[in-house]
Amino acid sequence: MNIVKSFGEFIQYLLEAATRTFQPNEEEYPEIGVQPYSGDGASEWVEF
């Protein structure tokens, strides 16, 4: 009986971890997308 109980707890642990991994994101960041670079480019090539 103890093995069956331990196996059930192990399966529950794995399912809870998978649920947390694949659930929708709860962070509320604005969806701004990719922003184009609008600054000045380098005026000449610089070697490092």
Image (cartoon, rainbow, N blue to C red):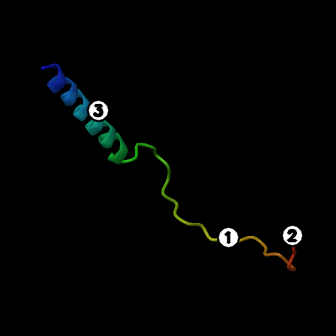
Q: Position of residue 39 (x, y in %)?
A: 75, 70
Three-letter amino acid code at the position of disc 2: Phe
Instruction: Using the image as rendered, state which of residue 23 and residue 39 is in the foreground.
Output: 23
Task: Specify the farthest residue to the top.
Answer: 2
Secondary structure, mark 2, is loop
> Which residue: 15% across, 26% down?
4
In which quadrant of the rendered view does residue 1 lie?
top left
Instruction: Using the image as rendered, state which of residue 40 and residue 9 is in the foreground.
Output: 9
Distance between the alpha carbons at the discs numbered 3 and 1: 45 Å
Three-letter amino acid code at the position of disc 3: Tyr
Find disc 2 in the rendering and name its residue. Answer: 48
Three-letter amino acid code at the position of disc 1: Tyr
Depth-wise, is mark 3 or mark 1 nearer the camera? Answer: 3
Distance between the alpha carbons at the discs numbered 2 and 3: 52 Å
Mark 1 / mark 2, whichever is N-terminal: 1
Q: Residue 37, which numbered label?
A: 1
Distance between the alpha carbons at the discs numbered 1 and 2: 23 Å
Q: Residues within 10 Å of mark 1 (few under 14, many from 20)?
A: few
Q: Residues within 10 Å of mark 2 (few under 14, many from 20)?
A: few
Secondary structure, mark 3, is helix
Secondary structure, mark 1, is loop
Q: Are the residues flagged by discs 3 and 1 in contact, CB closer than 8 Å?
A: no
Find disc 3 in the rendering and name its residue. Answer: 13
Could you tell whether 20 is left or right of 48 in the image?
left
Q: Position of residue 44 (x, y in %)?
A: 87, 80
Could you tell whether 24 is left or right of 30 in the image?
left
Above or below: residue 23 compared with residue 39: above
